[in-house]
Image: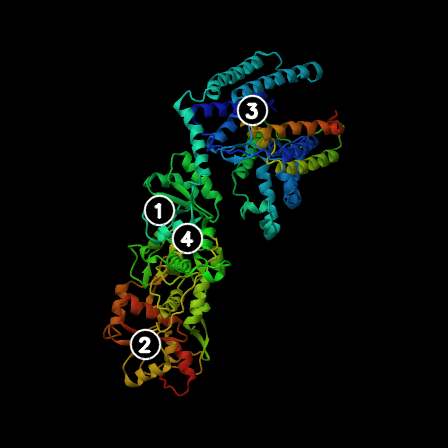
Amino acid sequence: MFTALLTAMIGISAFKGLGIIDPATELFYMPTYYGAYIVGGLIFGAGFVMSGWCPGTAAVGAASGKLDALVFLCGAFLGSILFNELFPVIKPLYTAGQSSQDAFGQAGVAFVYTSLGMSEGAFALIFTLIAIGCFWGAEYLEKIKAKNPESGMYFQTPFLKAFSLVFLVFAGTLLFFSAPEAKTPTAGFELAKAPSSDESLLASVADAQDHVEPEELADALYNGDPNFIVIDVRPANEYKRFHIRGAKNVELPDLPAFMQKQDKAAKVVLYSNGMTHPAQARDALYRQGYRNVFILTDGLNGFINTCLKPVSLRKTPVSPQKADQINAWRNFFYASSAKTQIPADTPSLPGLVSTDWLFQNLKNPKVKIIDSRPQPEYNKSHIPGSLATSVENFRGVVGGLPSMLLPPALLSAKFSLMGIESDDIAVLVYAGDNVRDTTLIGLVFERLGHKTYGILDGGFEKWTGEKKPVNTELPPDTRSVYPVVRDKDDFTADYRQVLAHVQNKTALILDNRPKDYYTGKKSDEARAGHVPGAINRPFKDDLVQVGSYTTLKPTAELESAYAALIPSKDATIIVHCRTGHQASQTFFVLKYLLGYKNVFWYDGGWTEWAARQELPIEK
Amino acid sequence: MKPYSNPYLAGLGLGITLLASYLILGAGLGASGGLARFGAYAECLIAPSHVLSGEYFGKWGENPLRYYLVFMFIGVFIGGLFSAISASRIHIKIEKGNKCPPKLRLIFALCGGILVGFASRLAGGCTSGQALSGGALLLTGSLVFLIFVFAGGYAVAYFLRRQWDD
């Protein structure tokens, strides 16, 4: 144990001296808590002697079949749990007696040579001498006292002599090399640079040169000042939820690489929710020579409270000029900047979105993935970040009719709960042959005038078939304020309009139910049959199985199939099925894949038509 | 059964391992940390919400086993197994003095284990994580811990020596 300690100690000192390890950034130090360590040490020593094991040796002991080691491990396992359970009570002791020293910006990190007031090299040499003394002493004691002939077998052997000598030489060399460093800090440029960098760092902090006030930042961004680069250092999901307009998301580990690429003249402002992480990052970058890094005073929370909190919610009165400024900032920072975020290679929407495109845009915060599969399937695995919903969330009894697409106000409310924004690109995911689930959700978007939605071509099975990433993590719990949009629904037809078209023969009615329902052979409703003059085109005829997944048939194939049924692209077409579900798929195919201009969707469908006894039917 | 290796050379090997760990990971070795993670995992299986809301295990998150010390612990176990097999030293037995009843020895091992598990959480590590890894960086706390481990050990050794008497 002492040998290991000596080896590693000498090695680390040597690597530090040679510049292989940077002690400030590349090593992990535990702060010293005298109280906790003294009590912990005493209890540990007692347990150590009582059991004869420590966790490391017991792992090896258990591996070689020592039952007591196994029992010890169970004990240590229980002891850890016990500590967790007692933590609320023990907490004061856990942090008791923190050392007043600090090192590398971490409070409580204390080095024993500093505690004893000597240089690192001198302490290392003394420590080595003590350890060698202990080796010889222990071997001697074992030799004269023990009955066992194997004890003390190394006493005065050439091995122990050589071993001791090697350590002494190493420790002595370290002292020799580290001594001038400690005594004459101006000896070399490199040596002089480190302390002065820390001093100037502290001076810059003391002069408050490290901060940017929220108002200053808000003003600069509002006025489009190009000299500010704003960095959000929080995790991507928090960034996605909300960030200061124009901020880039760079997490702490990626900062140094990011900084290298930046203009040295620009003011780089780091922020997080609070101030601790950005301040640490700023100090680290300062040490690396960046003088243009600042932190946002009070972080994002402070920014929102100072600049964006509505005037009506403030405790202190606000002058009218200030109120105007706050409102202007609110409009600016809460407005979305989505138009710049739509990738150039986005397919024309509404339409089909390829798995490759989605994969490229998985991290885009404006791309919202909506998974329409049943919740248990979603729970098992889903495309990262996707929101789960069922098509049934958007349907209900409206005007006495079941399974009607809900009115816009309710749909907006549901989108708000899902965190969907009116400028998002929604990618809808289905599984199996349930393309119609996504096309019906597509009609929800249509009803709200939201045209940037697409259906994932091939659905979930194509995605997984291509080994693209899935996980079980929940998406961020984000709310949005989706505006209530009325009067955008220009595609839903009610029975009166259908009837008028039937009587005047002004529209082509496409019945998308299976053939047996169209002919009236089968029926789930009050009456069997179909709307007079309607043509049957079952929705399943538009689907094709490709290997493991189902998707819509190739456009060329659909084009010729529908050209045989419909005279021109300008013809008025009304699609319907029983409840509007299956017909939503045909609607999507006709309008967005084939470019038919006047397609309408009769939501009430056969359920309503059959129930209204006055409406004509045909068998 | 082969004899154990030269303890000084074994120590040198352990020191080089620790050095490598500092070079590659920036952090030292540790055994109790991995063990505690298993504890947190087990408790998580039984009462996840209780664990996650707790102040100590809670900060380790839902996957306490995703931590380098857990893998290190498994590695130590496999290494021990390998060494024991290669030296044909695997025997299911209880390490104890001749006069000590096995049951008493196991009770001591369990109680000692609980103390060690508890104390290593309190002190932020055990002999490997705190005393050895921190000691190599010459951290005051680690050496204080080491001194008091000896103090605690000597204080109870007199009362407990019976289990080792031949």
Q: Are marks 2 and 3 on the same chain?
A: yes
**Residue A260 on image: x %, y %:** 35, 38
SS category of the residue bearing label 2: strand
Vertical order, A68 against A220 (above or below): above
Residue in the picture at 39% in, 41% down: A293
Per the image, label 3 sits on a secondary structure element best described as: helix
Residue that numbered label 1 is attached to: A228
Residue under label 3:
A113
The spot of residue A608 in percent (x, y) is: 41, 80
Q: Chain of mark 3?
A: A
Q: Earlier in the sequence, mark 3 or mark 4?
A: 3
**Residues at circles 1 and 4 in contact by the CB criterion of under 8 Å:** no
Q: Which residue is mark 4?
A: A243
Label 3, label 1: how far apart the Cα atoms are: 44 Å
Residue kind at label 4, given as amino acid type: His
Q: CA distance from mark 2 to mark 3?
A: 87 Å
**Picture residue at 39% right of the left edge, 49% below the top:** A216
Are the residues at dot 3 and dot 1 in contact (C-beta closer than 8 Å)?
Answer: no
